[in-house]
Amino acid sequence: MIEEVQQRLCEWVGGVLEGANVSFEPPSGEMKGRAVIIYLIEIIPKPAPRGVRSQPLQIALRYLVTASSEDRTEAEAWVAELLFAALKNPEWETGPEPLPLTVWESFSGIPRPSFLLQVPLRRERLAKRAPYVRLPLVVRDSPVEALEGVVLGPEQIPLIGATVELPGLQLSTRTDARGRFRFAAVPTEPRNRLVRVRAKGREAYLKTGPTSFEDGRLIIQFRELEA
C-alpha cells in the first residue's frame, strides 16, 4: 500500500515540476544532481472518533520533502512550488514545525529548505463473518391480550395525560380523564415486562409482576410529583 502512495507522490511531483526526478532515499550532504527528495520519516496512527467503529483503519505517512540541485536557488524554488501544491490538497497536511537539527545531523548533511507532508493511508476493516446457523428455525406463536391499567398520583388521585410506554415493544399511549390506559394487543409472553411512565415532571420504570395487578389492571403509583 505504501508503494501506491509513492506512485501517487511521483505523479504529483510530475504535475507540479515537469521532468523532475523523485527519490525516496534520505537526503545527505553528498547528494548531487537535480531531484526532489520525499523521504518517509514517520508512520503515525490515526484512531477513529470514539463510538465510530465502521470507519476504515487509518494511519498517516509523514514525509520530509526537500530538493537537491547544483543551483541552490532552483532547489529552493522547487520546494516552494511543491508546498503551494500540497496546500491545495484537502486530504494532505503540512507541518509548520521545522525538522530538528539533530535529524539533519543524522543524515550527515546540513539543513536545507524543506517541509513535512502528511498523507493518509486507509485500510478497510474486515467485517466479521456471521456464524453458520446449525439449528433449524423454530417459530412459536404467541397469543396476545389487552393490557389495561391506571396511573395514580399521591392520595390515589388519577393522573390525566400521563405517558405509558412499553419500550420492549415500542408501544406508547396516554392516560384518559380517569388516569386509565389500555394497550389493545400485547404478547402474553413474557409475563414480566418493563413499563415506563412519565407524569408531571416525574419518570418511573416498573417491572411488572403478579403483585403489580389488581382486578386484572396494572396499578402504577406515583408517591411524589413536581409542584
Image (cartoon, rainbow, N blue to C red):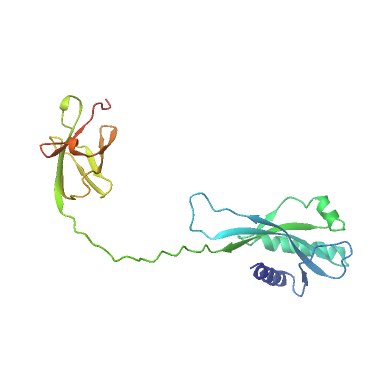
**For the point 18% across and 55% down, which residue is it?**
142
**Residue 217 can be seen, yes or no:** yes
Q: Position of residue 220 (x, y in %)?
A: 20, 34
- Residue extending farthest to the bottom is 19
- Residue extending farthest to the left is 215
**For the point 83% across and 65% down, which residue is it?**
68
Quadrant (top left/top right/bottom left/bottom right) for the C terminus: top left
**Residue 111 can be seen, yes or no:** no
**For the point 39% across and 66% down, which residue is it?**
132
- Name which quarter of the figure residue 41 lies in: bottom right
Quadrant (top left/top right/bottom left/bottom right) for the N terminus: bottom right
Which is nearer the eye, 69 or 222? Answer: 222
Which is nearer the eye, 50 or 29? Answer: 50
- Name which quarter of the figure residue 119 lies in: bottom right
Left or right of residue 98, residue 28 in this image: right
Q: Position of residue 4 (x, y in %)?
A: 65, 70
Left or right of residue 70, residue 21 in this image: left
Q: Is residue 184 above or below residue 196?
A: below
- Name which quarter of the figure residue 89 lies in: bottom right
Q: Position of residue 43 (x, y in %)?
A: 68, 57
**For the point 54% across and 53% down, which residue is it?**
48
Q: Is residue 106 above or below residue 132?
A: above
How many callouts does the rendering have?
Answer: 0
- Residue extending farthest to the front is 135
Which is nearer the eye, 14 or 102? Answer: 102
Q: Position of residue 225 (x, y in %)?
A: 26, 27
Q: Is residue 172 above or below residue 43?
A: above
